[in-house]
Amino acid sequence: MSNSAIIVAIFSFVLATLLALLTIPILVWLERRVASLIQDRIGPNRTNIAGFRLGGLVQSFADVVKLMLKEEYYPSHIKMGKWLFMFAPVITFVSALLAFMVIPFADTLHINGEALRIQALPIDFGVFWYLAIGAVGVLGVIFGGWLSHNKYALLGAARAGSMVISYELPLGLSILSFILTYNTIDFNAMVAWQSRTFFGILPSWGILVQPLASIILIVALFAETNRNPFTVAEGESEIVAGYMTEHTAMKFALYFMGEYIAMNTASAVIITVIFGGYQLPFVSTQMLLQNFFNFAISMMIIMPFTIGIFIRWMRKNNTVRSSVSTDGGRAFETKIFTIALILMALIVEGILIYLAFFSENLMEKTIYVTIFQIAIFVTKLMFFNLFFIIIRWTLPRFRYDQVQYLGWHYLLPLALFNLFMTAIVVVGAN
Amino acid sequence: MNEHIQITPRPKISLKNKLYLPAIYDGVKVTFKHFFKNLNDINEVNTLSYPEEQPTDITSRYRGLHRLTHRPDGSEACVACFMCSTACPSNCIFIEATQREDGHDEKKPKSFFIDTLECVFCGYCVEACPCDAIRMDTGIFSLTGIKREDFVMDKEQLLSHKGAFGKELSCARN
């Protein structure tokens, strides 16, 4: 194993861990702010560290501190299996975290003839890993609900368990049709397949090649991650908080964070399988490397515009109404961020100019393309998390029997039908 | 079939509604419109940045914190008749009466306490008062303190509150 292999392995592991764990506070913040904006409110925007509010993002860290410092309360009626009661949230959290580890963030790096995967777990059977580990998460929910010795928790756990059974099937079947189409079980190869075009003009993204399977996949993943409109396992209006009823402080927080990691993982899987992963449409990694000059020039033009638009938005919205006497340091914050963003833009421009005009080294360009693909991936990831959140604040919760009916009567037959049609087309085409 | 079973005919659902996806699309369109509008101009969101911005829509009928009114010569209008404390449903008014020496009436309150933590702000004391001596027209809606005793208003505090809507003096005593 060469040095570069070790560096890339450590880099991808750290990146995956950061992407999974650091997005939790961001997602909690995003959820609260998006919910409030949808409902014509403002949301948390006061908490700050030395005047830096980051649009209220600091609130999430304050929440974490609060949950850490809360009293650990054990329901005294839980006699047997107390350790499992405590361990259950960890199962949910860890399985959601592990499932994220097989997502490729960029195309395989080729350095000195070595193929290095930008994947925390460099395995080529990522789909199976995701399906296997992702399904373990519900065990934590079931244990937690069962051992709470509480009717609401038990009902919530039973609902979560039955929902996983009824939605794992359409999920697996729709992923099977993707496996047939892409002829691979490797997430990275799936992304590579999607960088082609079909019918000459369309990018061959899964959503266009397999629209039915894509919709089934998205719906099943919504159910798998317990997101609205499938939150029957924790339906407040019926069963208090479902399986989390007896869990307090950090035990609750682990369930809570596990849910957000699961959502993040689900977004990552949706992107990788049906939205072209870390690729831009029409643009494969080879094409980026071959036309690096054009790519660098267009980046040099697009990036300042994007940052300029963001700065304009920030200057307009990081303010208070004129009727409010103090702005709480918002003007200062805007100034600092404007300077930081412009500096960042200048540095990236400098690197691009160097790479486009002065560098003949292919490895430097490859690394830049890799970083660019990671940026694309994170952007898409955040976009799909936003999609999850907007759906949550749009749709009401389904009734429990409707959820089961949808799973068994619609999604399962549709997924089977789609699988057969895919198989016929694939066999016919070959 | 059993004649006791009554079958309610359900309306036919069209294919578009059965598919559910067009409805989701419509819903997302609405939420996204709100989201984007508010994201574009956060200061247009119709909320109050509370401690800095105070509400401006408190009307004269608003039942705020209590006050005791004055006569034109500056003495209190209250005659310690105990009507308010009798009417009070939460028993939060505590009055001690004493002889009045200034020639207006026979009695006046020696002490007059309102425990605002007990008070339910129903306004029955204002209705009951025969002398227009207690009113809830201060417009004060927020009362803060760091210990329980801070919330027990005594006579001096209640007399010092100003009416927010013009009428200062008692209408019944002069």
Image: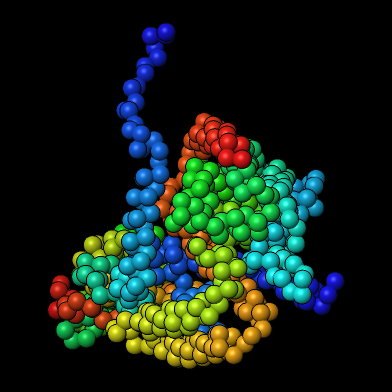
Measured as percent of width and height from the top left, residue A341 is found at 49, 86
Horizontal side of residue A89 vs B137, given as left or right = right
Which quadrant of the structure image shows residue B9?
top left
Identified at 61% across, 37% down, the residue is A427
Identified at 59% across, 45% down, the residue is A181
Measured as percent of width and height from the top left, residue A42 is found at 39, 70
Confirm whether residue B11 shows in the render. yes
Identified at 19% across, 76% down, the residue is B165
Instruction: Say which of B89 and A69 sits in front.
Output: A69
Position of A150 relative to A316 (above/below)? above
Which quadrant of the structure image shows residue A171?
top right
For the image shown, how many numbered marks are present on the structure?
0
Identified at 22% across, 80% down, the residue is B70
Measured as percent of width and height from the top left, residue B74 is found at 22, 86
Instruction: Say which of A60 and A280 sits in front.
Output: A280
Instruction: Say which of A218 and A207 sits in front.
Output: A207
Identify the image quadrant of the C terminus of chain A: top right
Horizontal side of residue B113 vs B80, given as left or right = right
Instruction: Name the image colouring.
Output: rainbow
Confirm whether residue A234 shows in the render. no
Measured as percent of width and height from the top left, residue A334 is found at 44, 87
